[in-house]
Amino acid sequence: MNQTLTPVQRVALARNPQRPGTADFISALFTDFFELRGDRHFGEDPSILGGVALYHGQPVTVIGHRKGRTLEENLKFNFGMPSPEGYRKAQRLMEQAEKFRRPVITFIDTPGAYPGLEAEARGQGEAIARCLSILSALTVPVISVVTGEGGSGGALALGVGNSVLMLENAVYSVLSPEGFAAILWKDASRSNEACDVMKLTAADLLELGVIDEIIPEPEGGAHTAPGAVFTAVDDAISRSLAPLLKLSGSALARQRYKKFRAMGNQAIRRDRG
Amino acid sequence: MSNVFTRRREKLLALKSLRSGGPRSAPAPACPACGAEVPRGELHKNLYVCPRCGHHHAVSAYYRLSLVLDPGTFRELDERLASADPLAFPGYAGKLADAGRRTGLSEAVVTATGRIEGRRTAVGVLDSRFFMGSMSAAVGEKITRLVEYAEKNRLPLILFSASGGARMQEGILSLMQMAKTAAALEHFSAAGGLYISVFTHPTTGGVTASFASLGDYMLAEPEALVGFAGPRVVEQTIGQPVPEGFQSAEYQLDHGFLDAVVPRRELRATLSRLLRLHDPKGGRDR
Ligand SMILES: [Zn+2]
């Protein structure tokens, strides 16, 4: 564990292009992966990668954000910023998982949903909202792993899990530090300052009750020893999944509802009249 | 129901509408759309819609409730829920106190029950004067409690949104309110609850990407800005100005995300009609 890293340093590690991403976790942790493509309404958005696979022999649905390493890949995957089609493909996979009673495992790594003209025209807000409501009510286990950047609503759209795990140097925040500084101080260049006040590290989020477990990374970050990270993530998912598989469908939905129902309780007080 | 109580409630809402910087006490600035300087009295008579160009001015939550609910039926819920400044965010506590003094509100949403042409309804209204209607944990909690109240009491639910999105000063806890409110509405919907969502100007960010987009019926006031990313963020992304009318209510109607754009003067009648269409007794006399 690297307990001495600053939030700014962790943001840099979370964004490192060599960091293992959803495609890497899928090939390392799963077998027989079959990719599902397209939202059946408008198009295929490769910045969301999803399909069915075997996890230690158990059929599961896997969904995650996909970033690229090269410029060419980044353009293809739009730097991991999904369009509404990506979120609607994710909805289709979630509903299919429900039908076939498969657990859902999600990997979160996005700067945020794409803020473009076409994305707005096709209902980015509605697409994310619908992911939240579908995930919240699934009667199969949902495990979410924040592996890199958890940026805003575009990250949360895959994050309504019975169990939410997070890599040690991943970050998860209401907005990117640059966006946060731009909105709050009208100055995107103050992003380092934003990192320090936003409480976006795994340790902060564990303390705030937003995540359930921190998965340790090797000294120097996940990209320096991916094999060790795959093993640690595999262990953490297995440990979280086992007890969930024993619960009934309605108990799973109830547990998830209660968990998110309580989020932010510490942020509320009763005013004097 | 005693007349005394009814009258008292009516007075209370009228008072709150005033105290909250509402209609009459607000100055009458030039219309932001056409520049016309309309006398306050005339604007008030016209429900704060510019008589020259039809621009719908922002109005306070209590004023909105007074336009929609039957006189004397307003009962506020969770009036005193407020932010506890969970991240001890620099400067936030002071700004909360300022916003409270300026608006008479303890948070950016007012939740209540009341009747619309006799039908009991749960109503929530975001107020853009309090931190731009942004979603603090207290806002998420008040809305969630309202949804749960509506489910428990089998009431229809109406939410008026007007929001800049997340409350930055509450960080990730603000973001989580998107999941919390969406989950509550999904539960409500599965139980057969009726939810009418009304977008008012402007609604963006996490509110658009959660409860505001999940209505059985989706309405908006004319020309209200409705989107996920705000127009300035979109302009930065695409490196050019957004087209005229982008993200307006009319644009969202054209793109399939709204059922109707409803002028303020027709809002109460429209809501009443939808409630009637969901009343087992239908249009028959009650
Ligand atoms: Zn005007």
Image (cartoon, coloured by chain):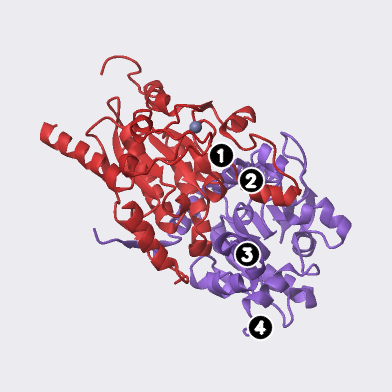
* Res. A90 in view: yes
Q: Is residue A162 left or right of residue A61?
A: left
Spot the purple chain and give its letter.
A
Residue B273 place in picture, x, y as percent: 39, 21
Residue B153 place in picture, x, y as percent: 31, 38
Asked whether A143 or A129 is in front, the reply is A129
- Distance in Å between CA atoms under marks 1 and 4: 45 Å
**Please, what is the three-letter code of the amino acid marked with disc 1?**
Leu
Q: Quadrant of the C terminus of chain A?
A: bottom left
* Res. A50 in view: no
SS assignment at label 3 = loop
Q: Work out whether mark 2 precedes mark 1 in sequence or the reverse, and give the earlier one.
A: 1
- Distance in Å between CA atoms under marks 3 and 4: 30 Å
Indicate the colour of chain B.
red
Q: Look at 74% across and 53% down and name the residue there.
A: A53
Quarter of the image where one finds residue B46: top left
Q: Nearer the viewer, mark 3 or mark 1?
A: 3
Q: Are marks 1 and 4 in contact (CB under 8 Å)?
A: no
**Please, what is the three-letter code of the amino acid marked with disc 2?**
Pro
Q: Chain of mark 4?
A: A
Q: What label does residue B225 carry, if any?
A: 1
**Please, what is the three-letter code of the amino acid marked with disc 3?**
Asp
SS assignment at label 2 = helix
Q: Are marks 4 and 2 in contact (CB under 8 Å)?
A: no
- Distance in Å between CA atoms under marks 2 and 1: 9 Å
Q: Chain of mark 1?
A: B
Q: Are marks 2 and 1 in contact (CB under 8 Å)?
A: yes
